[in-house]
Every structure is written in C-alpha cells, then in structure tokens.
Image: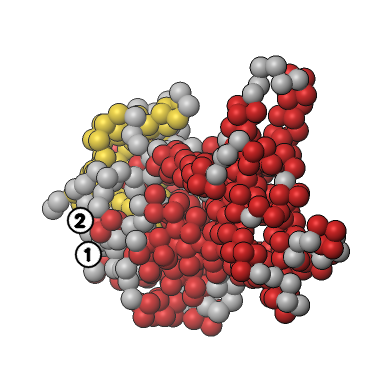
Amino acid sequence: MSAMIDFADVSKRYNGKDVLQNVDLHVAESEYLMVLGHNGAGKTTLMKLALGLAKPSNGEVRLLGENPLQILAMAHGHVGYLPENVSLYPNLTGREALNFYARLKGEPLSACDPLLERLGLASTAARRIATYSKGMRQRLGLAQALLGRPRVLFLDEPTSGLDPALRRDFYDLLGDLKHDGVTVFLSSHALSEIESFGDRLIILRQGHIAAGGTLDELRHATGLPVRLRLCVRPDLAQTTRIASELGPKVTVDEINGHTIDLSCSLADKMEVVRHIVRLDALVEDLDIEPPGLEEIYEYFSAAGQPQ
Amino acid sequence: MKTIVIIAAKELRDGFRNRWIFAAIVLLATLALVLALVGSAPVGAIKASPLNTTVASLSSLGVYLLPLIALMLSYNALVGEFEHGTMVLLLTYPAPRWQVVIGKFVGHLSILTLAIVIGYGLSGIGIALTGGADAQGWSAFAALIGSSILLGAIFISLGYLISSLTTDGNKAAGMAVGLWVLLVVMYDLALLGVLIADKGETISEQLFSWLMLINPTDAYRVFNLTMFQNVNVSAGLAGVGLKVGIGAMTSLIVMAVWCVAPLAATIYIFQHREV
C-alpha cells in the first residue's frame, strides 16, 4: 500500500528548542494511526508538518506523495483537518461557515446540509457560532473536515468537549469512514476511547517516537504482566492452598476471601491458564486482564524508558 | 481568483454582521453632512460654492478619519485570525496564502468604499438638492471620493503589514495607533518644526515639498487641492506642493506605491510565516 503520509528522518526546531527529532513514520492508505503523547510531546507539530503549516528543520515530509509545502491546491482538497479546540468564525452561522469552507474546497453547497444533519447540527445551523457550545463547535469543526470526501483526515483531540453519547457517535462515524478507505491520523489523550480503535499507535515522548506498533505489539514490547483474578468455590476455604499450587510462573498479588489476584508474563499466560483449567473443580470463575493502553502509555511515556 | 472572491465575500459579510459598515457609514455621513451644512457659512466672502467648501473640508476631515477607520478595520486581519485559531484551519484549505491576503484586502476595501460612497454621497446629495454646485465642483467631488478610497486602501495595506509583523493583537493595535499618530499628526508638525528651525537655509522649498509628499496623507491632500484649485483657501501646509508644481499624477503615483508596497511586503511575510 502506498504511503499517504510519510516522515523521513524529520526534525523540527522552534526558537532553538527541539520539538521533534528524527521522526520516521509512514502511514499507509486507509490506515488509522493513533498518536499519543503528553502535552508538548510534539503531536500537533507532527500534524502541522504533514499539513504544510510548518517547515521541517531537517528531513522530508510527504502528504499524498507530495511536499505539503508545495502541494497542489487540488491535493489539499483531499485533506480534512480538525484542529485542537477548533475555532470558527463567530459572526457566521453554522451553515454559513460550512458553506464558506465548502466553497473553498470547490464542493457544492448541497453537500453541507447532509453533513449538518449527520452531525446533529441541522436544527442549530442558522444560529451564530458565537452562541454554540464547545461540543457544537467541535461537531461543526468535524463537519468541515469531512467536506469533500477527504482521503486523509487529521484529527487533533477530536472528542474533547463531546459528551459520552457524542463520543460514541463520533467513533461510529470514524468506523463508517474506514469502509470508505479514508486514512486517519488522530491524536488523543482519551486512551480508553482509542484503545480498540486504531490499527496502529505511536507514542511520542519529548519529540521522539518512543514506541510504535499495534496494541498487541506494544503490549509485548513492554513486558508488562497479565493480571488474572480467580474466584474459588465459596464452600472451599482453601484459597491459600490453591494459590500455592499455581506454579512458579505466577505471582500471587493478593488473596482476598475467595478471590486470588495473580499476575504472569504475557508469554506464560496460556500455560498458566491451562494450569488453572486443570483446577476445574476448585475454580468458579476466571478473569483475564491484559495490560491496558493506559499502562502501556505510562510505561513508554515515562522518562528513562528506552526509545 | 475564486478564492479571493470567496474570502472577500466572507469579510464583507463579517463587516455587515459586526456593524462595522454601519458604524463607518454613520460616522462619515454625519460628519460630511455637518460639514456640508456648516461649510456654506463662509462662502459669501470668497465666493466659493458650498460644494467647493465641502470638498476642502471633507479632504481635511478624511485625512484624519479615513486612516483611522482603515487601520481599525485591518490591524487585526491576520494576527487576529492567528490568535483566534481560524487561520490554522484556513491555511489547510486549497487557498494560496497570497490569495488569502488579497481576498481580505478586497473585502475590507469594499467595506470602506461602501462607507465612503454612501457617507460622502449623502452630503453630495444634500448639496445637489440645495443647488450649490457646478460641474467643476462635481469633478472635484468625484476625485475626492476616488482618492479617499485610495487613502483607505493605503492604510488597510499598512494595517495588514502591522498585522503580519506581530503575533500579538494588542501589540498590533498599539502599532496601528502609533502609525496613525506618526503619519497623520506628527509628520507635518515635525516637518514644520524642522522648517522653522532651519529658517530656509538648507531645506529648499522643492526639497520640503518632496519630504512632505512622501507621506501618503499629504499626497492625498495635494491631490485634492490640485484637482480643485478653488479649495486652495484651506490648503494649509499642502499648499506648498501646489506652488512647486507637484501635480495630481505625482501624488497619485506616491499613493499607489504606498498602497502596493506594504501589501506586497505583507504577502511576502505571510508566505514565509509558520503556523
């Protein structure tokens, strides 16, 4: 698959401060890439470089195979961008603003109403943006990003300001776009939301890519343990004995009445599970919790971890 | 070209929405009407028609007011959009940066043109109704409107340059006020001070008139006075320009340069600006 976004050894310096250093990143067509990192880690700069809003100090950036700084106007028409805390013209109404952006993209104005409808703004489209709530502005921002059936979408903290129901709608919408082959480059702090969403994740730390891969790959790379919770039959007051029989590859974290909290390495997980299954008569329930994105993120974004 | 029209139309709509156009029209029309009415008082002694006097008065008024209105319209045009965050988004659209600047310029100039044509036009209608004008008066009045629009364009262009030079809207506002004071108020006074101190020893009348002409507001004055010799009675400092034969065309060229150069500089700076 061809690369829609390509960073080759890209560094960016602002006022003598390194914001990004030696970034190599290739985003394939219809891939969903989630970019994570603390504030100031370089997420927004990465997007701005890809969009041609800033020049790399070193290296080369390509968007749709072109230099984004010199990209043809037509190619930019294939790109949608939702900036963090999107700002739109407060004196215009929602519909006027969307019409303005549609005209700039060369889209027919008839494309606007279905988008307003889809994002739940049809009834408020005649109101000035100055009167919009943050969530409404965010939805209008998303509507303009979706104008013209973009091939690449850049979404910077897209769900900030949205309530839980709207967040769900937003991810449903992104799910639909996946079927259309849209490439998505999304940065977020909402780790639990994007955990099951992206094809691939990168974690930025102080301008470097600290880690990158699928969630499973990152999980294995951390070496963080899998947590298990065993519930022993209530009529058996032998929890401690059972815990001691689980073998050397298991660490018993806590015994609490009829439950035993255990952990083991990802590599040993299946062996431990098989062992537990053999205790069938003694065990009533088993929960397995692999390391979540929050733990993975914490692991890679903590200072001092290998890059 | 399409982008320019789209952005200009958006600025114009913004101008209507935030009452800018109405405020400017009301201001200019009120002052122009007052001048047209009051201006008929001294005409008896010097046998000038009310329109002649009004043109002289309006050009004197315009020198102060139009740069101020133009700078207020324009100083925030770029820096404001950067601060507000709308520029980041706009620049990801298929809109070349020079077209963004020109589009805004056309939009803002349209707002000012509307205000000038309607504001000054009302006083013209008032005078026409009272029958106080001749053909020469009308051509001077038309030249006044045209040159006033050009003066507005100059200060919109200068306002954009200020807007492109800073990342702080408050700083841009301060710079705009400073520029207005410098070009509209201080420049002539300083020049006069130099002339008095020099006592005509080193600064010839010729040099002095050219020093004066490099200020766009004086070029505007000279243009209007040369277009209409009768209004020479209130020529003031700009009368010097007439004596040394600086014509309307020279004034216009100076004004055109003042309009184009800051706009070109703005585009250059804006093209190279990182967001």
Residue with the most extreme left position: A1
Mark 1 falls on what kind of element? loop
Contact check, label 1 and label 2, Cβ < 8 Å: yes
For image coordinates 71% across by 35% down, the residue present is B188
**In this orientation, which residue lies closer to the viewer: B242 or A100?**
B242
**In this orientation, which residue lies closer to the viewer: A77 or A165?**
A77
For image coordinates 60% across by 27% down, the residue present is B207
Q: Is residue B197 among the parts visible in the rendering?
A: yes
Circle nearer the N terminus (1, 2) = 2
Placement of the N terminus of chain B among the 4 image quadrants: bottom left
The chain to which mark 2 is attached is A
Name the amino acid, label 1.
Answer: Gly
The chain to which mark 1 is attached is A
Estimate the x, y position of residue B272 in percent, counting from the top left: 40, 38
| Residue B243 versus residue B4 in the image, above or below | above
**Mark 1 highlights which residue?**
A181
**Mark 2 highlights which residue?**
A29
Name the amino acid, label 2.
Answer: Glu
**In this orientation, which residue lies closer to the viewer: B30 or B103?**
B30
Give the CA separation, mark 1 to mark 2.
7 Å
In this image, B174 relative to B157: left or right? right
Q: Quadrant of residue B194?
A: top right
